[in-house]
Each structure stands twice: as structure tokens, then as C-alpha cells.
Image (cartoon, helix red, strand yellow):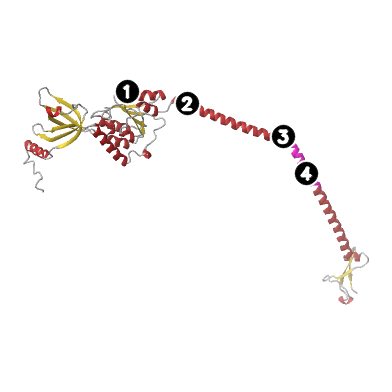
Amino acid sequence: MAEHEVRTSPEEPWPVRVVSQKISAWIARLGWVWVDGQVAQVSRRPGANLVFLTLRDPSAEMSLSVTCYRDTFEACDPPLREGSRVVVHAKPEFYAGRGSLSLRADELRHVGLGELLARLERLKKALAAEGLFAADRKRRPPFLPRKVGLVTGRASAAERDVRENAAARWPAVAFELRTVAVQGPTAVPQILDALADLDRDPEVDVIVLARGGGSVEDLLPFSDEALCRAVFACRTPVLSAIGHETDTPLVDFVADVRCSTPTDAGKRVVPDLAEERRLIDQARYRLDRAVGHFLDAERRWLTNVRSRPALAKPETLLNGRREEVDGLRDRAARCLTHRLDVAGNDLTHTLARLRSLSPLSTMQRGYAIVQRAADDAVLRTPDEVTTGDRLRVRLADGELAATVE
């Protein structure tokens, strides 16, 4: 175990005073530091020489108590008030009697406008280098959101402008309102909570950050780094409507759509019902005209087709074709008859030649054919038979049986 580690046990615990002393010693080692913050509360007791301040972190729900002498507090020009951005030179102290931590300040300085603008410019360059301002990551808000998330001040003119202008364009628009502080030390934490709450709501399709005009100091919460990163991380499209048209807090560059004023946001978050109806009427008119022109063109084409001779008097074409068919049938009949006549003549001549060469023709002139009955062999000489052989004598009209004697 290292030498500096604490050695305690249930049997040998440290008294409260020892723990308090050790905590005080550790805190005292920090020494004097410069602290940047926003004055959240000022407490001045009549006749007291000490002034008590609450210094809050501009981007988180964290604060520290600060004590200073009245002379140190009154040395600030202009006088400090709640919401002032200051730089404090202080030393942290732990009060063992109360168990509390506070800063003991010996110098308070206002953060000047020039210094604030320089800080914002450095932050703007850093965020731009990280791609938070890139145009290709910006999303198009939905054409008609189911519900519009609105983050604005309580009963503010910005809320009224957004609601009235949106309702004038689309009377059925629905809002999910989150009222927050829009300036001062509690503004950024409240806006972050409201933004995260609306981003989790599945019915909210778009979120509007709205605030009226003000000084650079009043609009500082909307240039806070934590808020810019939260808007960048939102899954829901965000519209920024902060101040007047000339006001450009850093959240304008991160948001998906930058509106010049809350009134402009009310006009851009929903479509104009009258304009959409006019566009629909125009589209229907153009569609009717297009369909009418198409039908007229088709009707003219049909009229032209019907006026052609082939459709006007289709029997004319059929009659011509019938004549052609009749002519072809006549030619085919004549050609076939001619061929049959030629073939008949050829057959007659062939039959005549065949008859002239046929043995039957010779036999009709008185000749006969003698065959041996045993094997039908034609006999040409008497030596081919013997006595007693049976013969077959074929005549022109029948045959005879004979025996050789």
C-alpha cells in the first residue's frame, strides 16, 4: 500500500474534525484560480461587509457559492446583477464547521462584449471544423407534422407569433409546448431538458426553438456549445427562430432550418392551407385540360379513321377482293381442266400403244398360247412335250384343256 493512502478501519475510524481538516487541506492546495461563470444570485445584507454570490455554470446545473468584500463587489463597473457573465479570481475554501465549499474572491471582472464575441467566433470555427454546420447533414422538415414541439419562454411574444401564424396557415396544427427560461443562468439547462424530452416523443415530427429579440448577452444561451451539440444530436428536425433577422446565434448554423423570426417559423413549420387548396385546384384544372385535350385528339383521330373508305364503305374492299377470288378460281378451273385433258389424251395414246403390243390383241386375230399344265411353261416346239402331257390352251376369249396324243 502507498504511503499517502488513508489507513482507517471500523476499529480505528477518523473523527469528523480530522476528515474535515484533511478535506480543507486538499482543497487549499488548489490555490488561487480564475473562474468563468454567470451570476445567478446576489445576497447583500444591510450593514454587513461581505457579499454572497451564487456563480452558475452557463451550460450545466452546477453552481458554487462566492464570498467577497463589499469593496470588491462595488468595484465592478457597471454594477453586477443577476445574469451577468463574470470572471472571478478566487480561492476555494472548505468551511469545516458547516461542511461547505465556497470561493473567496478578491477580484470580479465583467466579461466584455468584445471578449464574448471573440469566444463565440472561436467556438464557431471549432464547431464548423467538426462538421456541425455542414449543409449535407441538414434534414428537411416534414411537409405536414403530426405535432410541433415548441421550446420558448412562458407567455412570450415568440410563442404567440409561432402559434398564431401556424394556426392561420393550418388551423388543425397541434403543438407540444415546453416553456423554459430563455436567458439567464438557468436557460441552457432548461432548454437542454426540454429539447431532449421533445426529441424522445414519437409524435413530435419537428421542434422549434423560438425567442424574441434581445441584446447579444441576452441571446448568449443560444450560442452555448452544449446546446449546439444537443441540437446536432437530435433525431427530430430542429427549426431555429431566435431574435430578429439580424441576430445569428450559433444554434442557427447547427439547426436544420434557420428562420429569421418566430413569425417566420410559424409560417414555415406547416403548409398554407389556402395555398395548398389553390395548388390542388390548379393541378385539377391542368389535369382536366390535359384529359380534355387527349380525348379531343383521340376523338379527331377516330373520326378521321372512320371517314376513310375502308371503314366508311367496307363492302367496296370486299367486292374487289371477291372479284379477284372469282378470277383466280376461274383460272384455276381452266388450268386444271386443260391439264386433265392433256393427261387423258396421253392416257388414250398409251392405251392404244399398249393394246397394239398386247398378246391379247394377237390372240383376238386367232392365235393361242399353249402352256404345260404341270408348270405353266409356254411351249414353243413339239419337242417340249411327250405323249400324255396335259396342256392348257389360252384363247382370246377363255381357255381349253388338252392332252398330247
Q: Are marks 3 and 1 in contact (CB under 8 Å)?
A: no
Q: Secondary structure at mark 1?
A: helix
Q: Is residue 295 visible?
A: yes
Mark 4 / mark 1, whichever is N-terminal: 1
The residue singled out by tag 3 in the image is 312
> Is residue 399 shown above or below 404?
above
Viewer-side label of 4, 2: 2
Mark 4 / mark 2, whichever is N-terminal: 2
Q: Are marks 4 and 1 in contact (CB under 8 Å)?
A: no
Crowdedness of circle 1 by 10 Å Cα count: few (<14), some, many (20+)?
A: some
Alpha carbon separation for disc pair 2 and 3: 48 Å
Q: Report x, y in % for residue 42.
A: 17, 26
Q: Tag on residue 157? A: 1
Crowdedness of circle 4 by 10 Å Cα count: few (<14), some, many (20+)?
A: few
The residue singled out by tag 2 in the image is 277
Mark 2 / mark 3, whichever is N-terminal: 2
